[in-house]
Amino acid sequence: MNMETFTGGVPVPGYFIREELEARGWSQRDLAFILGCPEPAVNMIISGKRGISPEMAKALGKAFDVPPEFFSNLQNAYDLAQAREPDPGVARRARLQDRYPVREMLKRGWLQETDAALLEIQMAKFLEVESVEEIPHLEHAPKKTVSDDIPATQLAWLFRVKQIAKSITVLTAYSEKKLREALSQLRQLTVDPEEIRNVPRIMMECGVRYVIVEGLPSGKIDGVCFWLDAKSPVIGMSLRFDRIDNFWFVLRHEIEHILRGHGRQYAIIDVDLDKANADSADSEEERIANLEAAFFCIPKDEMDSFIARKQPFFSERDVVGFARRLQVHPGIVVGQVQQRTGRFELLRKYLVKIRQFATSGAIVDGWGDVAPVSI
């Protein structure tokens, strides 16, 4: 058999059948007789003009007293050698998708559909690194950075918030004094879910860039705070939980970070704030932010007293009356009672949805809307 029967260094399966026939002193006609098939069919397999089907692999296995997998593996190896090489972009796209939710980012309009090489370049620009080799979390990244400590899905969300924040023109310089004074104004808004629509305006009046970006699947991000420069704080929220209690806790949590200058060196990403409490905080920054957020919603001594007096029976009348006295929405009381007691079935109807109000007047990316910024 000449070398034309080899493809990519792999011979046709018939090459081995011919060698076995010669070793046994059989002819092709003999093999056809043994297999119970026409001689031309055997000739076509030996010459490589026809492949070995699963049925023929079993028959040849019986004829030569070897496992049928021997012949099916020969055929598979030959077929694989004949197959065209795949698009080189397959491996490059797989490497990106293995680390980042690229398909979701394309769907959300954060990246543009293109070939794999340009997609890598887009990712580098998106993550503000100079080259593909510096993209965090990829195996070829040459050095460890702060970004490597942030899960890739969260990192992608963070940089989208950062892109949008950079595009915002703030007419008022950031003022810590104004932001502290705004806390009482914000507290007054907690009575009515519709009043949440005023939050973006108040943030802008304090010089804080305020952005809402829908979270990516499995990101588990609630909010983030960071500074574009020494005078440009940013608060990003995901509205992961579309509930009034969670909204106000997360917002106040991020505001406290800004007031204390947290996030100046690197972004502080907050996850699972629905489970947050001061005792379980993993840093002093988080402990302080948790305390202030909880106190903003309901002062601790008030909440302690209410729970001590009412548990284990929290009637709707008591909860509504307590909320009215504190001038907050009942959902904020219900949220804290659930969190403190673990009774998440209590009065869930008061955990009203707020996304329609939170996104009104805010700069939003997600839920079908794409913020008009590009990389």
Image (cartoon, grey):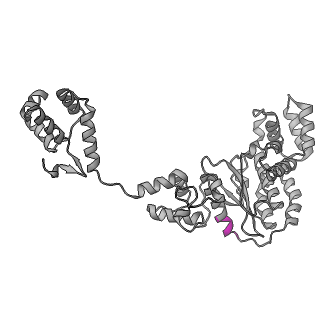
Q: From where the camera sits, is residue 365 visible?
A: no
Q: Position of residue 342 (x, y in %)?
A: 78, 33
Estimate the x, y position of residue 372 in percent, counting from the top left: 61, 66
Residue lying at the far front in this picture: please name it. 23
Front residue of 22/310: it is: 22
Left or right of 177 on screen, residue 50: left
* Number of on-image labels: 0
Tell me, yes or no, whether the highlighted magenta stretch contains residue 142. no
Q: Is residue 269 left or right of residue 288?
A: left
Which quarter of the figure has residue 206? bottom right
Q: Which residues fall within the magenta stretch?
A: 163-168
| Residue at 62% in and 63% down | 371
In the image, 317: left or right of 161?
Answer: right
Q: Quadrant of the C terminus?
A: bottom right
Q: Residue at x 49, y 62 (%)?
A: 119
**Would residue 164 be counted in the magenta stretch?**
yes
Of residues 226 and 308, the one drawn nearer to the viewer in this rendering = 226
